[in-house]
Amino acid sequence: MRIKLLPGERILVRTRPNPLPLVGPVLAGFVILALGGFGLGYLVHRPLPGLAEWQPVLAAGALVVVVLLLLRVVVRPLIRWSGHRYVLTSMRLIHRRGVTRRTEHQINLSAISQLQTEQGLLQRMVRSGTLVADLGFDRVHAYSDVPQIATFKEFVVQAISELPLTRMFDGVDMEIDPQYARGGTPGHQTWARQEWRGEQA
């Protein structure tokens, strides 16, 4: 499903979360395949005393168990990861998740009062991390495993600094004095832009 853009809005970045969380499930999948292959080989090639006639059934049951474990441990996290999208537009930050049933969370860039990044040791190695957007009034939204977290944050800060003056206060339209439009001192609007430039630095 394509994103319905607002008038004058454009997509700046579209990405999936970093695949680092899939390392554990993939390694577990290799272990399951190894153990399952060993078990199936034992059941097929070595007769078990008193269970020879049941060995085909046991082998089939073991195969079903291996497949179910792979679906649960490997395929399910992979599908869940592939259904996540982070989309940065010139006006909004959008988080989409889900494949069959999709949910979407979006915030206006003008509502963000502060950005914070959090990184674990492995995340620092692959340059991913969690981006926390503070919306004020104890409202925060976290975007986990954002790839190239430092660059992504810079893109968000840059997009906020380029917002029209009428959107600098939580999307509320404001009347701008013609003197400001001619290059006069725009008071709080200029302060807000300088504040975000300081964040970027």
Image (spheres, grey):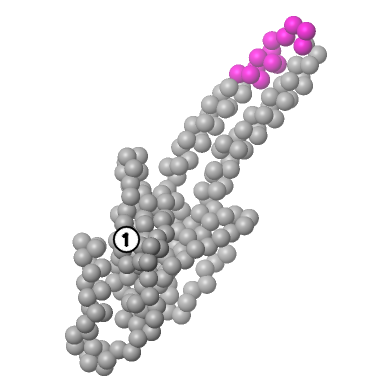
Q: Say whether residue 58 is left or right of residue 115.
A: right
Please identify the quarter of the rendering in which residue 183 is found: bottom left
Q: Considering only vertical position in the picture, is 198 above or below 63? A: below
Residue type for callout 1: Leu
Q: Residue at x 38, y 84 (%)?
A: 173
Specify start and end residues of the magenta stretch as a single range: 38-51
Q: Is residue 49 magenta?
A: yes
In the image, 129 versus 111, the foreground residue is 111
175, above or below 158, in the image: below
Where is residue 92 shown, x and y percent of the image?
42, 69
Q: Position of residue 175 (x, y in %)?
A: 33, 89
Is 164 magenta? The answer is no
Camera sees residue 44: yes
Most distant residue in the top direction: 49
Where residue 110 sits in the image (x, y, percent)?
36, 72
Q: Which residue is mark 1?
A: 115
Q: On screen, 134 above or below 26?
A: below
Asked whether 132 or 47 is in front, the reply is: 132
